[in-house]
Image (cartoon, grey):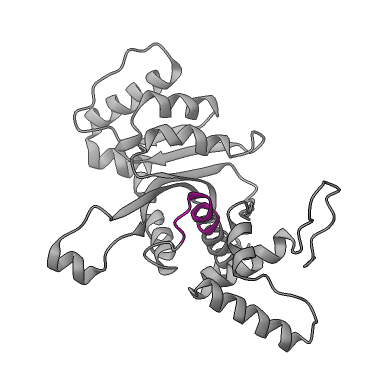
Amino acid sequence: MVWHAEKSGKRGRPETFSDAAIRTCLTLNVLFGLPIRQTVGLVESLIQMAGVDTPVPDFSTFCRRQARLAVQIPYRASGQPLNLLIDSIGIKFRSDGEWLARRHGTSRRRQWRKLHFAMDAGTGDVSALEFTCSRQGDSPLLPELLSQIPPDKPIDTVTADGAYDTRRCHEPIIERGADAIISIRRNGRAWKADCPGAIARNEVLRATRHLGRALWKKWARYHVRSRLEPRMSCLKRFGERIMPRDPDRQTAEIHIRMAIMNTFTALGRAEIKAVA
């Protein structure tokens, strides 16, 4: 790892630590659930044990660099068309304790943000994510998630619940050459067949009415969505809420969480091969 930052050639004081150094400190911070000052002390101890004479980012540097840190989430390529599972989950960042909430009720200070993500059903890795405010709906973010998938990677299916049963979701899925496995809403009606997305959605509605909702879900393998629940549980294992209050720092912490989850999935997931 390059610990010290390279000269950028721009005017002003250059950075002392590289992005990789800040990312490593932030990974230890999220992985062990430590405050920032304790994370700084942990990194100092590790460097002393390694016998390396190098400085460590202090509290102010850590907070300042975290707000503009770009985190690349690693994920494995299965070599096959992707089967994406899409959902969202809420993450708290400002709230009262459980005791106060039960005794006095929730207050106006209870706030949270929403994490929208797409997971590859084959590898279990999170391939795309968006971190938005709590007022943001689910369906407008599906095109943004699909745009994060490289155009040269084929997508076979996109599975989501009834919240994504909108035109803005079906049309981008058809444009990527994928099949939409989206549950029709209880009060769903046929759309005007004026675009390929509406035609494909009407076919799903016709199949649901003909086979029944339960049989259609089994035939379309809609219940593969249950693989999203372990991912959400793993995300909450890092903490029920995120510590930073600044939106940019919150986004960096969420990206670090996802990077750790994908790394653990790659290390602990069995590879099954057919034996002749």
Q: Relative to the observer, which residue lies in front, 228 or 15?
A: 15
Q: Relative to the observer, which residue lies in front, 24 or 55?
A: 55
Magenta region, residue range? 244-253
**Numbered marks: total:** 0
Q: In which quarter of the image is residue 73?
A: bottom right
Residue 257 in sight in this render: yes
Residue 272 in sight in this render: no
* Residue 154 inside the magenta-drawn segment: no
Location of the C terminus (image quadrant):
bottom right
| Left or right relative to 195: residue 203 | left
Q: Residue at x 28, y 56 (%)?
A: 110
Residue 234 image offset from top left, x and y in percent: 43, 65
Q: Residue at x 28, y 32 (%)?
A: 184
Q: Quadrant of residue 138?
A: top left
Location of the N terminus (image quadrant):
bottom right
| Left or right relative to 142: residue 150 | right
Residue 126 image offset from top left, x and y in percent: 52, 52
| Main SS of residues in magenta | helix
- Residue 54 vertical position relative to residue 190 in the rendered view, above or below: below
Which residue is situated farthest in the front direction here? 12
* Residue 249 inside the magenta-drawn segment: yes
Q: Relative to the observer, which residue lies in front, 189 or 102?
A: 102
